[in-house]
Amino acid sequence: MYCALCNQNKKPKIEVLGLGMCNSCMEELSSTPVIGTKYDYYKEVIKIALRNYIYERVEINPVK
Ligand SMILES: [Zn+2]
């Protein structure tokens, strides 16, 4: 399973919104200041992850 942020095939420490995230990325994410280019990047990743997650849920459990 690939890390959702660095795309490296590390063993994901945690799973967020259906995506694996390695420990180093998680630490970096939690220590990233609100103002900064990296934060914007992570924000986009989370946004995409969230959208994919919702999409998958809809596909698996279609609304009756
Ligand atoms: Zn990573």
Image (tube, rainbow, N blue to C red):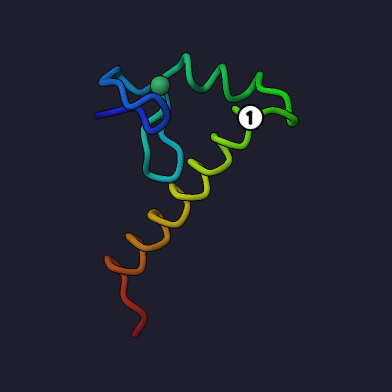
The answer to whether the residue bearing label 1 lies less than 8 angstroms from the nearest atom of ligand 1 is no
Does residue 39 appear to the left or right of 50 in the view shown?
right
Where does residue 46 sit, x and y in percent of width and height?
51, 43
Quarter of the figure with residue 62: bottom left
- Quadrant of the image containing the N terminus: top left
Q: Tell me: 47 left or right of 63.
A: right
Q: Would you name the residue on which mark 1 appears?
A: 37
Name above or below for residue 60 compared with residue 63: above
Q: Quadrant of residue 51?
A: bottom left
30 w.r.t. 46: above or below: above
* In this rendering, position of residue 19 left or right of residue 38: left
Residue 32 vertical placement versus 44 (above, below) = above
Where 24 falls versus 57 (above or below)?
A: above
Q: What residue is at 37 percent from the left and 44 percent from the top?
A: 18
Look at 27% across and 65% down and name the residue there.
60
- Identify the amino acid type marked 1: Thr
Ligand 1 location (quadrant): top left
Other residues around mark 1 within 10 Å, as few (<14) / some (14–19) / many (≥20): few
The kind of secondary structure element at disc 1 is helix
Q: Residue furthest top?
A: 24
The count of marks equals: 1
Residue 43 percent coordinates (x, y): 58, 40
Residue 26, horizontal then vertical, whole percent = 52, 22
Residue at 36%, 80% in the rendered image = 63
Residue extending farthest bottom? 64
Quadrant of the rendered image containing residue 21: top left
Question: In percent of the image, x 55 and y 34: which residue is there?
Answer: 42
User: In this view of the protein, which residue sits in the foreground, 31 or 38?
Assistant: 38
In percent of width and height, residue 15 lies at 41, 34
